[in-house]
Image (spheres, rainbow, N blue to C red):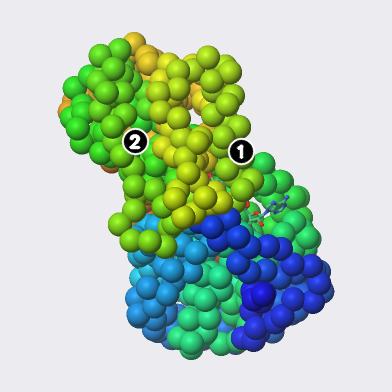
Amino acid sequence: MTVVAHLIHGELVAATGRTADVYNPSTGEVSKQVALADRATLQQAIDSAKSAFPAWRNTPPAKRAQVMYRFKQLLEQHEATISQLISEEHGKTLEDAAGELKRGIENVEFACGAPELLKGEYSRNVGPNIDAWSDLQPIGVVAGITPFNFPAMVPLWMYPLAIVCGNCFILKPSERDPSSTLYIAQLLLEAGLPKGVLNVVHGDKEAVDALIEAPEVKALSFVGSTPIAEYIYSEGTKRGKRVQALGGAKNHAVLMPDADLDNAVSALMGAAYGSCGERCMAISVAVCVGDQVADALVEKLVPQIQGLKIGAGTSCGLDMGPLVTGAAKERVTGYIDAGVAQGASLVVDGRDLVVAGNENGFFVGGTLFDRVTPEMSIYTDEIFGPVLCIVRVGSLEAAMQLINDHEYGNGTCIFTRDGESARLFCDEIEVGMVGVNVPLPVPVSYHSFGGWKRSLFGDLHAYGPDGVRFYTRKKAITQRWPQRASHEAAQFAFPSNG
Ligand code: NAD
């Protein structure tokens, strides 16, 4: 059976010890194994990155950007292969896989602007014959740890920008669907990236702990579940590292009585059930302002949920594939059981879905709960599956209070035709990314991505302008060239222009 290898110093490095199973979620079968790095393997990657850093940090940003231009072309040329690899191991549909790749390519395009992004600031004559400027310098060896749900896009949020900023990068992808991530990294080498500037090391907690503990690794970017984000943030910052750790979510959509309901229903279908609900920006709660909106929403949603086209992700023309693993399926069906036990009204039940020809796949059908209340675990927890919960409230203020009281604050949106309600919502909602009639407000690559509250630990958001700040250190330089033959006496008062 194929064992997915590490990529260290430009070479594929076979597993030397432990491995993990990689599944085809559509069939339920183990399709590959993936190497799980031990500390010695990880150290090889660190040594490689360290050795590549001096030359790479001094490579002109324009030359670094040229590698990214070639990388973008290769990503576009190989879209079909990459989408197939994503779909085979993640289970998402081919169209959805191509969509995530395209959003990832946007981040490569942003990184192509390195010469402009890395321009510092300059002030002439800040004092007599004194000029000052600030410089954005790379940090050194930095690492990224990424989740299973976007094996192409989330790594592309990180390393193109880190690398054009002059850093060397170690990527620890999700061990559940590593093949597309590795394939994409190989394309970057093909684009001309010098050996050691990007290394890919597969693994689990052992590899992550080794990255946290290695003194050579100066910064960590993490995207994944909140408990692990908190762990990495606290262990990394304790060791003086710069850490950005993006966590889980529970994203609410508010439906106002004046919303264009048909469009809101279409938007909700995609946002709740696309990618089988395995998106950190998935809408998992619809907050209906008034019973009339809720009743109308249920009536319109039910036939659409029952009509979802579900099957093997690698087939064309589907709405939804399976969940990523058997454990994910158990977890999601466990939450549906709990919702029923806790008294929510189960309107559409996806637990017994069987896909003909793929009976052992990890499928769960679209599920809808109505009359969900805030103390139920289907409301409090991130389910990460195709489950939409309807909560009924009496006013916009009550809807906003509900959202603001939730521990997560990744994304949210409001469906309304009323500018005043939309403006109030944008102003006062305690969530990092907000949509107005836009269900998945994932910022484009030249803005930055990040949640609030327990959806992000760290000061800066991911990619875009915040990404440049995260992957660089600012240096302020003050320079004076005194006029020849002038001599100045020592000054003991603090220097000023006063
Ligand atoms: P996960 O937390 O299980 O895994 C993420 C990464 O952490 C993987 O590389 C994994 O190998 C590693 N890891 C797992 N257990 C670890 C441990 N005990 N110690 C150290 N490292 C460990 O997350 P996942 O299931 O792969 O992804 C889904 C989660 O990611 C969801 O909670 C989702 O909301 C979140 N997510 C958030 C964003 C965001 O931008 N906020 C984006 C995508 C996914």
User: In front here: 497 or 88?
Assistant: 88
Q: Is residue 487 visible?
A: no
Residues at circles 1 and 2 in contact by the CB criterion of under 8 Å: no
* Relative to 233, residue 241 above or below: below
- Along the line of sight, the residue nearer the viewer: 361 or 252: 361
Marks 1 and 2, how far apart at CA: 21 Å
- Give the residue displayed 37% in from the left and 73% down from the top: 80
Earlier sequence position, callout 1 versus callout 2: 2
Q: Is residue 294 above or below residue 313?
A: above
Q: As displayed, is residue 208 above or below residue 12?
A: above
Viewer-side residue, 75 vs 156:
75
Question: Residue 58: percent from the left, percent from the top?
Answer: 55, 84
Some atom of ligand 1 lies within 8 Å of the CB belonging to the residue at label 2: no
> On the picture, is 440 further left or further right than 190?
left
Please state which of residues 124 and 233 is positioned toward the viewer in this rendering.
233
Residue farthest front in this picture = 357
Q: Secondary structure at mark 2?
A: helix
Residue sitting at 68 percent across and 62 percent down?
21
User: Which quarter of the picture shows residue 470?
Assistant: bottom right
Q: Position of residue 364 (x, y in %)?
A: 49, 41
The residue shown at (51%, 25%) is: 379
Would residue 8 appear left or right of 466 to someone viewing this image? right
The amino acid type, in three-letter code, at marker 1 is: Arg
Judging by the rendered image, the residue that carries numbered circle 1 is 331
Q: Secondary structure at mark 1?
A: helix
Quadrant location, the N terminus:
bottom right
Residue 184 visible, this orientation: yes
Mark 2 — residue? 305
Q: Residue at x 79, y 76 (%)?
A: 16
- Left or right: 134, with 329 as reference point: left
Give amino acid for label 2.
Answer: Ile
Q: Residues within 10 Å of mark 2 (few under 14, many from 20)?
A: some
